[in-house]
Image: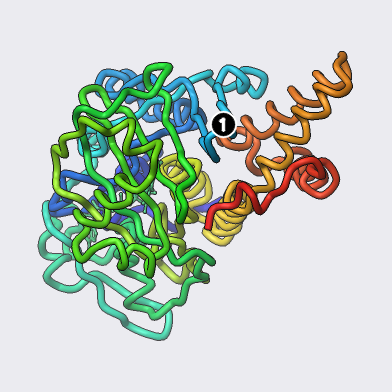
Amino acid sequence: MKKRIHTVAILGSGPSGSALACHLIQRGYSVTLFDDGSRPDLLVGESLIPSILPMLDRLGVRERVAAVGLHKPGATFVFGPDSTITFNFQAVSKCKLPTFAYNVPRAEFDAIIEQRAIELGVSRVAQRAKVERTGTDTLHLTAESLAAAPSLGGKQPDLLVDATGRARTFARVLEIPATVGTRKDAAYFAHYAGFEEPQPRGQIVITRLAVGWSWRIPLRDRLSVGVVINRDEAARLGETPEQRLEAAIARDPALSAAGANRQRLTKVASYTNYQLITERGHGPGWVMVGDAFGFVDPMLSPGLMLALRSAEILADNIETPAKYARQMDAWLRAWQELIGYFYDGRIFAMYHTGLALGKKYPGAISRFMQSHMERNIACMASGASTLSRYSRGLVKLMSRHGSWLGDPSASAIV
Ligand SMILES: Cc1cc2nc3c(=O)[nH]c(=O)nc-3n(C[C@H](O)[C@H](O)[C@H](O)COP(=O)(O)OP(=O)(O)OC[C@H]3O[C@@H](n4cnc5c(N)ncnc54)[C@H](O)[C@@H]3O)c2cc1C
């Protein structure tokens, strides 16, 4: 195909923007990357999933990430005092992925990918870019932003990429709506010392709370603790983010016991309105990647994997953005579907049914069914087969017909 695009300007040097810059410069495009570097020190997105590791390899940064990250063997879901499911990434060896991931300090993780882009020759402009609308569906860089980027030589780039995350710059300027998720949650989180360390080392723990859920993500020298709660309920817990997070920890028996000696090391960060998928992710001369295109939900930690995957898919389809947008939409909706099973309790109903049947009818067939289901869910949640029609069909079938010994509503997250 004849190349129409030669110059690309990317707004935002978060993981999606920097990763895209790396892929495009290696394919011979002239790439300008705008960001003023004013990101807060404390950022969510610290738990990775195995499918991101091959992407880090392709970026040439896996060793650097390993040097700042903590080996993550899997995830434990605590749905009640007697109801725990432990996912071990060993199960994903069958879907040809590494059997672990990392938990990472976000500032360092982002800096590694951005640094890689600069090493590869991307022109970095230390400024927030501004765009203005030029027609119903068109926009360009303002004269001020164009002048700040000598690499563009005073000419508008052939392609503008919105990698500005939840700022959703192009969607705001072009007034493109987003499909909004069903949950009305707020997330509050901070770093702590003195919390009990989840076992085995590096394991993340997701705990169902009376309202909402919490995460515990071990980093090398601290624990990231977050709660995700309905916004109205959060308001009842206190005035400030600090009061809300502390109250949510204090009122949950498992969390308050694990954090009896906790000391908060950072301020509390809060996030709202993050379940958004853009209704249109590309137009004439522009396209969106990463969170600017869409983000589903933090449960199961798909965000950074999707940010890097969107950069790869776009780099492969830069001349055919409609194809890219279709693939991204499919990824986001597949994650949404999978995460739905965790919120409405069906995953646990299936799990309990499998255990009960295994006890009642011990033998090779029960063991095979149980491990086949677990492997399929682990491969979907690790990002290997999230899109697989077979895995999705199997989970759908079992959630309808293989969960009768468990009560989904007893494990649902409200
Ligand atoms: C509560 C919560 C918990 C999460 N937990 C996880 C998790 O455990 N694991 C996981 O993988 N994901 C998680 N995520 C998602 C993850 O944080 C995001 O998916 C990821 O940060 C998206 O990367 P990005 O590069 O698209 O955007 P961002 O990381 O938001 O980067 C956007 C960049 O654009 C810059 N920018 C903004 N405006 C401009 C402008 N005008 N010009 C230039 N630059 C600009 C910003 O400064 C920033 O550097 C979580 C999200 C939420 C809400």
In front here: 95 or 374?
374
Q: Residue drawn 45% across and 54% down?
A: 212
In front here: 248 or 385?
248
Can residue 75 be seen in the rendering of this structure?
A: yes
Which of the 4 image quadrants contains residue 175? Answer: bottom left
Q: Residue drawn 36% across and 35% down?
A: 216
- Using residue 168 as the reference point, say whether residue 311 is left or right of it: right
Can residue 26 be seen in the rendering of this structure?
A: no
Query: What element does badge 1 sit on?
Result: strand
Q: Indicate the colouring scheme.
A: rainbow
Which of the 4 image quadrants contains residue 401? Answer: top right
- Using residue 397 as the reference point, say whether residue 163 is left or right of it: left
Q: In this view, does 71 lie above or below 228?
A: above
x then y, percent, for residue 139: 33, 75
Q: Residue drawn 35% across and 70% down?
A: 170
In front here: 388 or 153?
388
In front here: 121 or 87?
87
Q: In this view, does 212 lie above or below 171?
A: above
Q: Residue drawn 29% across and 72% down?
A: 140
**What amino acid type is highlighted by mark number 1?**
Thr
Q: Name the residue under label 1.
A: 84
- The count of marks equals 1
- Using residue 333 as the reference point, say whether residue 140 is left or right of it: left
Crowd tier of the residue under label 1, counting other residues whose Cα lies within 10 Å: few below 14, some 14–19, many 20 or above:
some
Which of the 4 image quadrants contains residue 204? Answer: top left
x then y, percent, for residue 96: 62, 21
x then y, percent, for residue 210: 47, 52
Q: In this view, does 266 lie above or below 378?
A: below
Residue that protrudes farthest toward the top in the picture: 364
x then y, percent, for residue 166: 33, 61
